[in-house]
Amino acid sequence: MTAKSGADILLNSLIEQGVDTIFGYPGGAVLPIYDALFKHPKIKHILVRHEAGAAHAAEGYARSTGKPGVVLVTSGPGATNAVTGIADAFMDSIPLVIITGQVPSTLIGSDAFQEADTVGITRHCTKHNYLVKDPDDLANVMKEAFYLATNGRPGPVLVDIPKDVQVADGANCDSSKNQKMRCDIPFEADFNDITKAMELLANAKAPILYTGGGIINSGPHASKALQELAQLSNAPVTSTLMGLGSLPAEDDKWLGMLGMHGTYEANMAMNQCDVMLCLGARFDDRVTGRLDAFSPNSYKIHVDIDRSSINKTVRVDLPIVADVGKAIDQMIKIWKSRKFTAANLDDWWARIKGWRAVECLNYPANKDEIMPQYAIERLYEATKDKSPIITTEVGQHQMWAAQHFHFQEPNKWLTSGGLGTMGYGMPAAIGAQIGNPDALVIDIAGEASIQMNIQELGTASQYRLPIKIFILNNQWMGMVRQWQELTFKSRYSESYSDSLPDFVALAKAYGWEGIVIDHPDNLDEGIAQMLDYDGPVIVDCRVTQSANCFPMIPSGAAHTEMLLDNSTVSGEMDDEAKALV
Amino acid sequence: MYIHKEKSERHVLTLTVDNEAGTLARIAGMFTARGYNIDSLTVADVTEDRSTSRITIVTNGPPATIEQIIAQCERLVPVHKVTDLTEEGPHVERELALVKVTGTGDNRIEAIRLADIYRARVIDATTKSFIFEITGSPEKIDTFLTLMREVGFVEVGRTGVAALMRGHMPS
Ligand SMILES: Cc1ncc(C[n+]2csc(CCOP(=O)(O)OP(=O)(O)O)c2C)c(N)n1
Ligand SMILES: [Mg+2]
């Protein structure tokens, strides 16, 4: 076996893993890898404009294709710039492999130029990370890195490679055949547990399926299986922000999203259910509201691939550690073989009908100004037949998109849930478009968030990516302002979006198309113009400034204490409430 | 407003981990990052090929937190096994301490007498000082230190707890 440089071994591993795209940015400490890339035209490198963009783009690629996203950045500032995206992927369980250059191993610890303790900095926002000190270890490390990123609960894995290790020759060019992967993948769920779960579900008077991002991570099959389980059990289905699209929104079992900005029917059903089957969700604080008032009378079954998610915030009655897709398959099998039938749920559905009648997503009509919810509705109507991929930034616009855009398939909704990272949407759209060249990809943005990674306009121009950015421009950090109205007696401390750029001129400067929509009468036409344009477009959709996002369960309140409209929002909260996230 | 605190329990955990760079930092850092307590932590490799280390952590927290601590430890890639000895049943805990004491006259005699009762050995002596080596449960060492404080205590170095399950089974 001939020896190869560390950089070549690395690229070999990438090819072996089937990687065809990497998102990156060069610099001193990765030059040997970039030079090796030159010889590997099979791997397409997407040059971003900022390393945060690389990480989010890789997330968008991963989330929309189901394949791991790969990031390549230099040491020091390259690595630290990528940290936000890495932390984001960690929170939302997105499979990434991040390769960072490091100063030569002989200089580590000497405060060398562009040295940062990357492994130290990313230790708690990666699933695992490595500092590779010998090119002979690289092949095995890379294999394990991909394995860890994609198996069990997916997540980011970082490999830090000193420059001398990239240049030096290694004799182990291939990973060893009998390498043991250190990744606990849960066994098939216990037959008795699944049977018990199905017995409970079949006998429930008021069941609910509470689903999350785990269903998406488990693969498209899990979404199909979920649909079948809902059909068999006649149970209503709600989902977290991360799980949207796993059950088609047109399904009659669909209650809409739950949680802080979830629907009235979803939250009331969660509160009143007698059996809760949680599938690949993690009882996040945005979902549960006040813990001691969370679904007080239900028997809780929790299926999660990560045992640490179980009993973390809410104690459950029947924990099942398993891949949720496989667990649902088992459930369906047992349901059928035991010839279970759903109990009569007419009463339960009648109550749900009552909650639905509240029409919690209604908003005041406005003839003169564009209501942001209306803009999303029209965007949905205009694009629903094109099966678009929607990304978002973070804020009110994100929640309105989750409420008013309806998803029929998994992997079409890319949003920063756990970390809530403004600036996620555009690079994620870039990654999604790279992974799905023919798809319609739209970033539903806020005027503040979009500026956080605005430099990525250049990336889309360079690779001729026809992504669309639809800015709901309310001239406010709307979500911040909404909280200030709710909690701090409308003292608007630094939440106004001042000195906004001319988004159309900005678009043009990057070779994009720019469109302003500023009246409800022009909305459909503007959207059509955006869709017709063969290339990237920014739409500066001027929406009414004062709208707030409802329904809302204020932080620390119970599901039943939901605010349905603006009239309830104002005043000052006590310190306990102010301290809540 | 006040920050709510729950009642804590002491638990002794042992972890079997890969002996590689960063493992300890990963575990200790996870405790800090998630706000868990470490009362003591000992680590040393325990296999002939030095590939595996055993870490003994004494921690405290409400039961739900202890459960999370164990799950979070298991989630770390180089951690292969976590055992909660406090839950598993009877186990032995030992700690070693080196205790420096100075004094002359009655204090010096009293120190030696107490050391004898506690089976502490003298491993260094001058005309004005002793260093005692004492092994035992953490409580025994605590009591010994309380007594030494009355007769000329200077400083102590403690190893932290090492622990094994009683009986013939591995923990
Ligand atoms: C990186 C980052 N910084 C700060 C925040 C806090 N934050 C949440 S929403 C928001 C305002 C977003 O404003 P905009 O993008 O205009 O969206 P809108 O709420 O107006 O729709 C801020 C500052 C965040 N989520 N992410
Ligand atoms: Mg805004």
Image (tube, coloured by chain):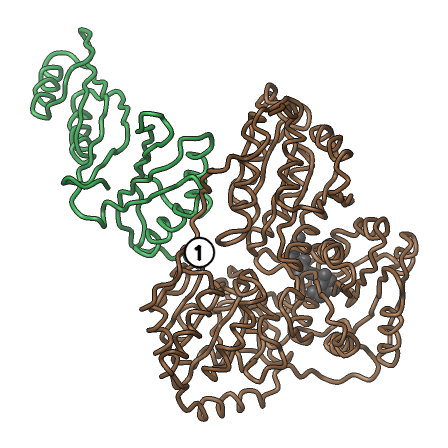
**What residue do we see at 74% from left, 76% from top?**
A384
| Residue type at the position of mark 1 | Asp
In the image, the chain rendered in green is: B
**What residue do we see at 19% from left, 9% from top?**
B125
Binning the other alpha carbons within 10 Å of mark 1 as few (below 14), some (14 to 19) or many (20 upward) gives many
Between residue B55 and residue A259, name the one nearer to us. Answer: B55
Please provide percent x and percent y for residue A547. Answer: 71, 74
What is chain A's hue in the picture?
brown
Between residue B88 and residue B110, name the one nearer to us. Answer: B88
How many marks can you see? 1
Does A377 appear above or below A124?
Answer: below
Answer with the quarter of the image where residue A244 lies: bottom right
Between residue A493 and residue A549, name the one nearer to us. Answer: A549
Does B118 appear above or below A391?
Answer: above
Please provide percent x and percent y for residue A43. Answer: 73, 43
**What residue do we see at 60% from left, 52% from top?**
A88
* Location of mark 1 (residue): A306
SS at circle 1: loop
Q: Quadrant of the C terminus of chain A?
A: bottom right
**What residue do we see at 62% from left, 38% from top?**
A13
User: Is A378 placed left or right of A70 in the picture?
Assistant: right
Please provide percent x and percent y for residue A218. Answer: 53, 61
Q: Quadrant of the N terminus of chain A?
A: top right
Q: Quadrant of ligand 1?
A: bottom right
User: Is A382 placed left or right of B41 in the picture?
Assistant: right
